[in-house]
Image: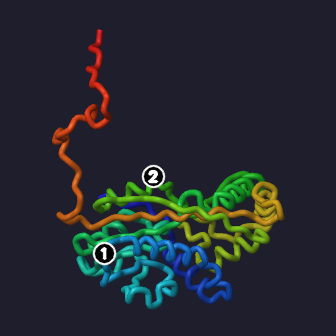
């Protein structure tokens, strides 16, 4: 079996998260995580089902302290979840760091009881698009090349397909986008550091980014992405994936050719045969 490529240095990610928890701005930097949790709560309130055995997979356990009496487990490559033990599994703000995202989702599905719900929230492909562009342009100008600096984040159309690959029924993908404003480039970087979201890519440079690159990136960012009052705009996209553990009670697609009504009748128009070739 082919192993997925190693995207993330998991030891570095753990160090960054541990360092972030000790920083004074840590809780403030998790504002997007709290926004994501509020969105999940709203979605759950619209589901006509009671959940009594929830589990949460995340690198941010403090966000879920006391939440629905859920079992909270870290986003390790092998999840500490019992098979068929939960009616709700939330994978929260961690899938973008997974070396095997489909494997993570398969483990979540296996942890669900039949007709159990899985909700996944993660940053989408438009997140930090300004920062990625500014860093790439600055490094190309200063050093004549590029290095991996921001974890790649999937587009919604691709992320939605992961749920199907993992075996979920009735998969849905949608997103919400926020524009966050910062007073300065260092303030943006400090927020990422306090949230534990700094560079943990396996292929990252193993030295500090030079001051000249950061200075040029700050200039490019300010020139290209400033608001009218000279604050820096940063895009944050949250993608939410929804899927259900298969169950016989769920709506099933019809077999091809099993329709009992003609489309022309439903539309109230005459049916015309296609012209023959030649």
**Position above or below: 105 against 13:** above
Q: Residue at x 59, y 78 (%)?
A: 196
Q: The residue tagged with tag 2: helix, strand or loop?
A: helix
The answer to whether residue 203 of the structure is visible from this angle is no
Which image quarter: residue 87? bottom left
Q: In this rendered view, identify the residue nearer to me: 150 or 223.
A: 223
Residue 240 on image: x %, y %: 46, 65
Q: Residue furthest front?
A: 268
Graded by Cα atoms within 10 Å as few (under 14), some (14 to 19) or many (20 or more), the crowding at tag 1 reads: few
> In the image, is residue 99 above or below residue 146?
below
From this view, report whether residue 141 is shown above or below residue 72: above
Q: How far apart are labels 2 and 1 at the CA level?
A: 28 Å
Residue at the (62%, 64%) spot, across then down: 178
Which is more toward the observer, 221 or 36?
36
Front residue of 26/2: it is: 26
Q: Is residue 18 visible?
A: yes
Secondary element at image label 1: loop
Residue positioned most to the top: 278
Using the rendered view, name the quadrant where residue 200 is placed.
Answer: bottom right
Quadrant placement of the C terminus: top left
Q: Is residue 116 above or below residue 268?
A: below
Q: Is residue 67 left or right of residue 103?
A: right
Q: Does residue 203 appear to the left or right of 141 in the view shown?
A: left
Question: Which quadrant is home to the N terminus?
Answer: bottom left
Q: Nearer the viewer, mark 2 or mark 1?
A: 1
Residue behind mark 1? 49
Q: Residues within 10 Å of mark 2 (few under 14, many from 20)?
A: few
Mark closer to the chain start, 2 or 1: 1
Q: Relative to 109, is 126 on the left or the right?
A: right
Q: Which residue is mark 2?
A: 157
Residue at horizontal 61 percent and vertical 85 percent from the top:
27
């Amino acid at each position: 079996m082919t192993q997925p490529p190693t995207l993330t240095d998991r030891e570095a990610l753990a160090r960054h998260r541990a360092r972030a928890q000790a920083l004074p701005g840590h809780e403030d930097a998790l504002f997007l995580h709290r926004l994501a949790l509020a969105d999940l709560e709203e979605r759950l309130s619209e589901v006509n089902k009671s959940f009594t055995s929830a589990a949460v997979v995340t690198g941010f356990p403090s966000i879920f302290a006391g939440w629905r009496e859920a079992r909270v487990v870290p986003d390790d490559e092998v999840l500490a979840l019992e098979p068929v033990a939960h009616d709700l599994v939330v994978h929260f703000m961690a899938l973008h760091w997974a070396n095997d995202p489909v494997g993570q989702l398969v483990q979540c599905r296996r942890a669900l009881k039949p007709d159990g719900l899985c909700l996944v929230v993660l940053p989408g492909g438009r997140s930090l698009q300004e920062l990625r562009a500014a860093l790439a342009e600055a490094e190309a100008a200063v050093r004549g090349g590029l290095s991996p600096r921001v974890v790649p984040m999937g587009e919604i159309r691709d992320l939605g397909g992961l749920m199907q690959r993992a075996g979920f029924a009735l998969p849905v993908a949608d997103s919400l986008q926020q524009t966050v404003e910062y007073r300065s480039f260092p303030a943006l970087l400090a927020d990422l550091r306090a949230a534990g979201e700094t560079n943990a890519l396996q292929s990252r440079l193993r030295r500090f980014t030079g001051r000249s690159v950061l200075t040029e990136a700050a200039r490019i960012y300010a020139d290209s992405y400033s608001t009218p009052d000279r604050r820096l705009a940063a895009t944050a996209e949250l993608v939410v994936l929804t899927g259900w553990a298969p169950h016989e009670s769920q709506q099933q697609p019809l077999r091809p050719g099993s329709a009992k009504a003609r489309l022309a009748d439903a539309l109230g128009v005459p049916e015309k045969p296609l012209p023959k070739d030649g």
